[in-house]
Amino acid sequence: MNNLAIHVEKLGKRYKIGERQRYLALRDLLTNVLKGPLRRRALVEYLWALRDVSLSVREGEVTGLIGRNGAGKTTLLKILARITRPTEGFAEVHGRVGSLLEVGTGFHPELTGRENVYLSGAILGMKKPEIVGKFDEIVDFAGVEKFIDTPLKHFSTGMQMRLAFAVAAHLEPEILLVDEVLAVGDFDFQRKCLGKMEEVSQSGRTIIFVSHQMNHVRRLCERALWIDGGKVRRDGPAREIVNEYEASCLNVKADDLEHSPGPIAFTRWMVENSQSNQLDLDRYPDRVVLRFGAYVKKEIRKGILFIALRSGDNTILWSSMYHDLQINPGHVDLVHTFSSLPVNPGIYFWEIRIFDGHEWFEYVQVPEMSVVSKIDSNVFEHLKGSLRLDASFDLQGSAVVELGKS
């Protein structure tokens, strides 16, 4: 167990259900004492956010935590970060921990951005020369140079998030806990974060990464833990566990759809030709049909649909936007037909969003499409691109030697 960064044994966390008690003045306390014997005591309800969780994470391992909202993922990270105490069991953490659980976690709103960077470094146990050596890199990554000496309370949410991530990633904790940091922010910043996390993981540091973006988990993590109802449901190779989780998300009950947040719930998707997420280019070189299912609870008038195809490194290969959608409540299929998809074998991702006239709703379980083919080119593997285009080659010019002549 020497090389374990984290060891959790029979961990449980229980919360009391009910409103937080308001501030009581002295007169309130005296009144409560007098009325106490006459007042009927209310029943107290409890909720187990985690129960009987046991797991180990080795040094240098990159582990993804996946599961539905409310499954217990964030609670587990808060216990590992020593933000909250477990109700039962224990968690051993060996190494300096950096955590990014919420925007600006550990920051003080009255301090400037500069002061918060030094404060965060000190909390991590770093000496001032170490922080000074990383300071310019942190500020440059966060893109907040003009505001670094402004109190944090005047930062926008996006600026706070960028600075928080930059601090957590650059001050070199031995263990990095990250919860949905990529859920906010523009695409360019998400790409920077992914690149930085890959760099951190390759340096041998331990990462536990919570995300609802399954393509990010596949890309970053070698292992995944599926948390369901406060317990570890599955533990294994990231790609295998993510595929199982996505399959379970497709079996959505009608009642769950009615009570899901927001007016739109995406339910399932498939490559129609194969009835799965796989596109076989040898069998279907032409006319590819994609079907995305959704459940609409409120009518949409003048809606907008955005769809994009991304490569494995998140580069957009193709995108389109459709306006003035008219959709009544109920189940709907968003069907896209392509005369062909000229891509090389590999893993690709579909990004799909609907604007209902008020806000955008994204397909959270990002659809992964596996493209396969037995036909392979003679290009070196590391030089292959994403596109598979028909092209011809010819030699022209006075220096060309004709075939059969010397």
Image (spheres, rainbow, N blue to C red):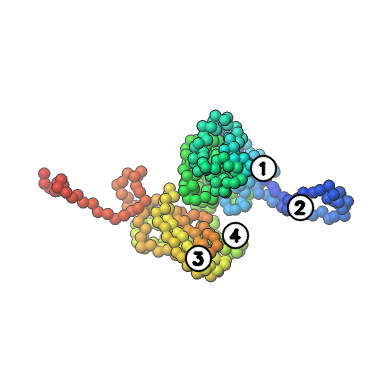
Query: Alpha-carbon distance for marks 4 and 2?
Result: 27 Å
Q: Is residue 313 visible?
A: yes
Residue at image location 32% in from the left, 44% down from the top: 380
- The secondary structure type at the circle numbered 3 is strand
Graded by Cα atoms within 10 Å as few (under 14), some (14 to 19) or many (20 or more), the crowding at tag 4 reads few
Q: Is residue 59 visible?
A: no
Tell me, for residue 17, which label it has, or none.
none
Q: Which residue is mark 4?
A: 261
Query: Alpha-carbon distance for marks 3 and 1?
Result: 43 Å
Among the two numbered marks 3 and 2 on one chain, the one whose residue lies closer to the N terminus: 2
Among the two numbered marks 4 and 1 on one chain, the one whose residue lies closer to the N terminus: 1
Tell me if label 2 and label 1 are in contact, CB under 8 Å.
Answer: no
Residue furthest to the left in view is 406
- The secondary structure type at the circle numbered 1 is loop
Query: Mark 3 belongs to which amino acid?
Result: Gly
Residue mark closest to the camera, 2 vs 1: 1
